[in-house]
Amino acid sequence: MKITIEANIAAPIEVVWKAWTTPDDIKQWNAASDDWHTTQASVDLRVGGMFSSRMEAKDGSMGFDFAGTYTEVVTHQRIECVFGERTLRVEFIPGPDGVMVRETFDAEQTHSEEQQRSGWQAILNNFARHVVRKIGA
């Protein structure tokens, strides 16, 4: 099963793309709630390049790594990757009010569809807030 989430971000495509693909930015927005954070991130943005991030609870009680390989990179348009046996497609769609970021990913079996959708959407919403803060809007 595939899950799709999206958010419209009132910012230029160049700013949105850079915030999505820069490790220092990723560490600022990649969390679903205020009690989690990303302690490290790396990006080798090319087909066959690897990405990784470490998400941890701020109280130190748990954490996990999220890593994979880029399978397609079209600057300012699309990023596709595999992580484990799952795939992720991120589309950057410019429009009159900014950029629509749409993520489509393979669901996993541990958590319900709604838990996955809400968790990934929370991270995407955090990304949108980060970009808007970045441009000072």
Image (cartoon, grey):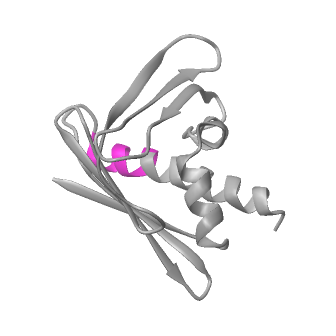
Q: Give coordinates of residue 3: x percent, y percent.
A: 27, 56
Q: Is residue 97 above or below residue 80?
A: below
Q: Is residue 58 above or below residue 8?
A: above
Examine the residues drawn in magenta and state their main secondary structure: helix
Give the quarter of the image for residue 89.
bottom left
Rendered residue at 65%/63% (across/down)? 15
| 8 on left or right of 118 | right
Residue at the outermost top position: 61
Nearer to the camera, 16 or 63: 16
Rendered residue at 55%/74% (across/down)? 99
Report the number of discs: 0
Residue at the outermost right position: 136
Q: Give coordinates of residue 83: x percent, y percent.
A: 27, 36
Give the quarter of the image for residue 45.
top left
| 66 on left or right of 87 | right
| 134 on left or right of 108 | right
Nearer to the camera, 119 or 38: 38
Rendered residue at 64%/14% (across/down)? 59
Q: Magenta includes 52?
A: no
Give the quarter of the image for residue 111.
top left
Q: Give coordinates of residue 32: x percent, y percent.
A: 54, 40
Q: Which residues are magenta?
A: 112-119
Q: Magenta includes 117?
A: yes
Q: Give coordinates of residue 57: x percent, y percent.
A: 57, 21
Q: Quadrant of the C terminus?
A: bottom right
Rendered residue at 22%/38% (across/down)? 108
Nearer to the camera, 88 or 112: 88
Nearer to the camera, 54 or 123: 54
Q: Is residue 109 above or below residue 88?
A: above
Residue at the outermost bottom position: 96
